[in-house]
Amino acid sequence: MAEEEQFAELAQPSEGAEPSEVSGEVVRVQQGQVGTVRGDTVHLAQSLARTIRASEVKMQDSVALRIEADELDLEDSAVAAVRADTVEIKECTAGLVCGQETTLSDSTAYAVVGGVVRVESGRPLVVIGQLLDGSIRPLLALRSAAVMGLLAGVGAALVLILRGLLRRRR
């Protein structure tokens, strides 16, 4: 059986128009802008997407707001939020990355959460993982995040206690 393949080479939508929705088994977007992309395999090159949901996603020189996938391969791209089983990020900027197996190469990520986190080079700010591998120097690691959370909880409790005491005096 031949694979169904849908190509999306879209012109810029007019101002105020909603980006389109594209779906298919194999979806390729080249120099286009789409709203939602759904498919088994999605390839984006020099494109912009709001949401991508697929089994396998490959992006190069592209931007996406949210990606949900089984396997994700990003190169020279930017993404705000990622949730995938296997994530490989090369020379990218990412916001929140959640993956069972995550590899960052020459990339910046604001928060990485996962089972196995490998950083070959790059700078994740917050890293929470069961197994950390590579040159990871996060701004906030798991232990320091736990301490910060504990201190925030104690601080909030003290504020509530003081507020209660001040109300009783009135």
Image (tube, rainbow, N blue to C red):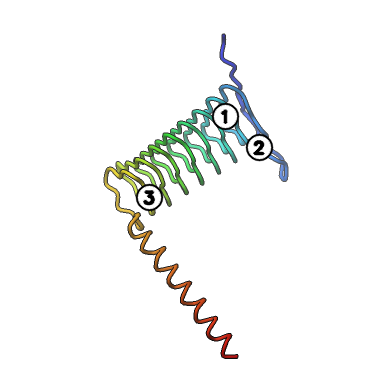
Left or right: residue 24 versus residue 68 is right
Mark 2 Cα-neighbour bin, 10 Å: few <14, some 14–19, many ≥20:
few
Q: CA distance from mark 2 to mark 1?
A: 13 Å
Q: Which residue is mark 2?
A: 12
Q: Earlier in the sequence, mark 3 or mark 1?
A: 1
Amino acid of disc 1: Val
Pick whichever of labels 3 and 2 is earlier in the sequence. 2
- Badge 1 density bin: few <14, some 14–19, many ≥20, Cα 10 Å: many
Which residue is rendered at x = 55% and y = 42% of the image?
66
Residue that mark 1 sits on: 29
Q: Which residue lies at the image location 59% right of the left edge and 16% below the top edge?
A: 4
User: Viewer-nearest of labels 3 and 1?
Assistant: 3
Front of the two marks 2 and 1: 1
Pointer 3 local density, CA inside 10 Å: few below 14, some 14–19, many at least 20: many
- Residue at x 45% of width, y 43% of height: 98
Q: Earlier in the sequence, mark 2 or mark 1?
A: 2
The mark closer to the camera, 3 or 2, is 3
Task: From the image, tell me which residue sits under label 3.
Answer: 128
Mark number displayed over residue 40: none
Quote the CA–CA distance across marks 3 and 2.
39 Å
Residue 28 pos. (x, y %): 56, 26
